[in-house]
Image: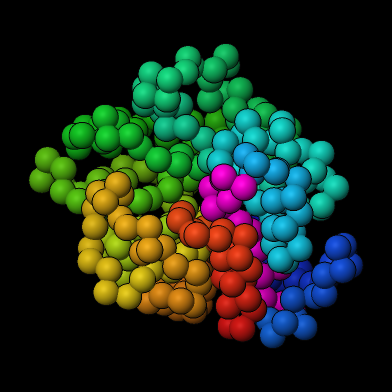
Amino acid sequence: MRIIKRRQFIKSSAVAGAGLGLLGLSPLSACGVEKDSPYMKDIGLQLWTVREQLKADPAATLKAIREHGYQQVELMDMDQLTSFRPILKDLDLQVYCSHIPSAHFTGRWELRNREAPAGGIEAAIDEAAKEGVNHLIMAYLFREERGTADDYKQLCDGMNRAGELCKKAGIQLCYHNHSFEFAPVDGEKGFDILMERLDPDLAKFELDVFWTSIAGVEPVGLMKQLPDRIALLHLKDKLADTPDIFDEGEVPKEAFKELGNGVVNIKGVLAAAENAGVNYCLVEQDQSPDPIKSIGTSLQYLNTL
């Protein structure tokens, strides 16, 4: 499946609003968003945001996501597609992106208490291509997978090899960042190694603006350093006066805020996205006392920009 580049997508955006009658939704332009807004037409949600709600009632949770106005969901793992496929189809919720385990590239399946899946990364790519998933994202590195600079270099080499297979299948492979990549390791920063060693044609970034910001790096400035290397954005906001934190386990729950309720320059991020070559934007909020309410608040904010 050919990946539609953002600049091409903008040209074809005159059809905005078509098909939004499902579930009584109105075109987003009626909510204050320009009808040709390139990212709101296919705005997505990373399902990690509602992980507990999905366990309790997947059908009701996915319906709530759709009713809020989200057009696509990003899977936590391709395994979710098997469980959710009928519901997603009924709700007309698209799936273009899915996270996949780092063990595909590091071989550390024991860290996930599971054996390597049959067929390895090749099977995952084949399934994604069959299902129309056009972005696969390396989601998270365990501490044991990132202890040295060589760990990062070996990861990059593995992702480059897998990226060649993805490219042949019409899929873009990506790396999702947290804040630990910006901390020193063996005198280097993990993120610098990623920028230098990942082949820009084979492995791009899913830039998470919260984790970038909490590492003390201004997201818009970083985006300007990475033209055509960011395929996806995770949009989330950060509580004011939160200190820089590189250990993701030490981030307080209250640091994660709905879009517009924090200090991340979301408007600037979206403005920079087109120049950076971003394909899709996906809302995510790792922690919330009421995730369903939070995803509505975040989308309502985006509708005002």
Quadrant position of residue 126? top right
Viewer can see residue 280: no
Q: From the viewer's perspective, is 142 left or right of 149? A: right
Q: Quadrant of the C terminus?
A: bottom right
Magenta stretch in the rendered image: 35-53
> Is 253 within the magenta?
no
Residue at horizontal 57%, vertical 70%? Answer: 298
Residue 263, relative to residue 152: is it above or below? below
Residue at horizontal 38%, vertical 63%? Answer: 254
Residue 258, relative to residue 113: is it above or below? below
Residue at horizontal 76%, vertical 38%? Answer: 85
Residue 185 location in percent, x, y?
16, 43
Q: From the viewer's perspective, is 268 left or right of 192? A: right
Q: Which residue is more in the foreground, 19 or 232?
A: 19
Q: Which residue is more in the foreground, 219 or 296?
A: 296
Residue 7 location in percent, x, y?
62, 67
Residue 291 location in percent, x, y?
56, 59
Q: From the viewer's perspective, is 164 left or right of 169? A: left
Q: From the viewer's perspective, is 154 left or right of 231? A: left
Residue 25, relative to residue 178: is it above or below? below
Residue at horizontal 54%, vertical 53%? Answer: 49
Residue 203 location in percent, x, y?
45, 44
